[in-house]
Amino acid sequence: MDRRELLKLVALATGGVVIGGEFFLAGCTNPEAAVGTGKEFSANDIAFLDEVAETIFPKTTTAGAKEAEVGKFMTVMVNDCYEEADQKIFHEGMKKLDDACNKMHGHSFMKADAIHRKELLTALDKEAKEY
């Protein structure tokens, strides 16, 4: 998936939240939602997700992913729409992403500069396409 395609999907999804958000999310009610199960996202997790999203959608003349609170949006989608097994995979994926950054650059994703973050995500995207 290229950046334009991803932007279109995010625009569609976030537009649905802005316009009739409750209707958009009505089908995403998970009776096993993460609240109170020990699977909640911490403030650090949300900051991490914001930084990953900001690497893909940086601030330009328009708001970036952090200003749009994409990290917070992702937590709502994961908690409300993902089954328990998929929530676990998502949380594990966050850790794997951080581990991959440590392996590639010798530091965590949160300590990485924009160039290292982009290099990591580009390498992972290439790997996924080859897979």
Image (cartoon, grey):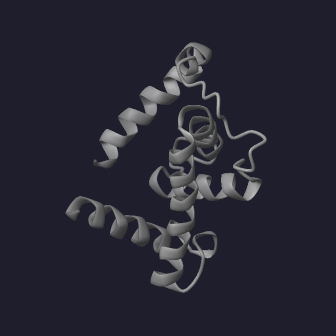
Residue 84 makes an appearance in the image: yes
Is residue 46 positioned above or below 109 on the image?
A: above
- Please state which of residues 87 and 131 is positioned toward the viewer in this rendering: 87
Which quadrant would residue 77 be assigned to in this image? Answer: top right
Determine whether, in the image, residue 2 is placed left or right of residue 85.
left
Which quadrant would residue 106 be assigned to in this image? Answer: bottom right
Determine whether, in the image, residue 42 is placed left or right of residue 118.
right
Q: Residue sitting at 43 percent across and 27 percent down?
A: 12
Is residue 28 positioned above or below 107 on the image?
A: above
Q: Residue furthest bottom?
A: 106
Q: Residue furthest left?
A: 130
**Residue 9's spot in the image, x, y percent?**
38, 34
**Residue 17's spot in the image, x, y percent?**
57, 23
Residue 53 makes an appearance in the image: no
Q: Residue sitting at 51 percent across and 68 percent down?
A: 96
Q: Quadrant of the C terminus?
A: bottom left
Q: Residue sitting at 24 percent across and 59 percent down?
A: 129
Q: Residue furthest right?
A: 36
Determine whether, in the image, residue 107 is placed left or right of residue 2.
right
Is residue 17 positioned above or below 103 on the image?
A: above
**Residue 121's spot in the image, x, y percent?**
41, 65
Is residue 57 positioned above or below 62 on the image?
A: below
**Residue 81's spot in the image, x, y percent?**
54, 32
